[in-house]
Image (cartoon, rainbow, N blue to C red):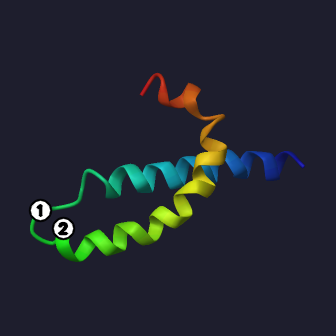
Amino acid sequence: MENQEAKAPEAAEQAADAAAEAAPETPSEPATEEAPAAEAPAAEAPAAEAPAAEAPAAEAPA
């Protein structure tokens, strides 16, 4: 049971990391082509927002 609980926060952190890396790394030129791509993961963002409620403590020090 502990493994599943440990994987949940890890997945949330990985998703947050991926989103954080994708957001600031969006260049201005290919932004037009990457814009639709950014909207696709946005649909999965809500799923990451659920565990994010427990992650605010981790984002505070960051």
Q: Residue 51 carries which label?
A: none
Report if the CB atoms under discs 1 and 2 are less than 8 Å apart.
yes
Given residues 19 and 3, the one toward you in this image is: 19
Residue 38 % position (x, y): 36, 66
Residue located at (52% from left, 66% from top): 43
Quick one: SS at disc 2? helix
Horizontally, residue 32 falls left or right of residue 37, namely: left
Name which residue lies at 58% across and 47% down. 49
Dividing the picture into quadrants, the one containing residue 30 is bottom left
Specify whether 36 is left or right of 27. Answer: right
Crowdedness of circle 1 by 10 Å Cα count: few (<14), some, many (20+)? few
Three-letter code for the amino acid on which mark 2 is drawn: Ala
Q: Which mark is residue 31?
A: 2
Whole-percent x, y for residue 29 in the image: 9, 69
Please report the residue visible at 55 percent of the width from the left and 46 percent of the height from the top. 13
Which residue of the protein is positioned furthest toward the right in this rendering? Answer: 1
Q: Is residue 11 above or below residue 6?
A: below
Q: Is residue 10 depicted above or below 35 in this figure?
A: above
Instruction: Give the residue type that dot 1 points to.
Output: Ser
Q: Which residue is drawn at 22% across and 60% down?
A: 26
Name the side, left or right, on which 50 lies relative to 57: right
Return the residue nearer the eye: 57 or 6: 57
Label 1 sits on residue: 28
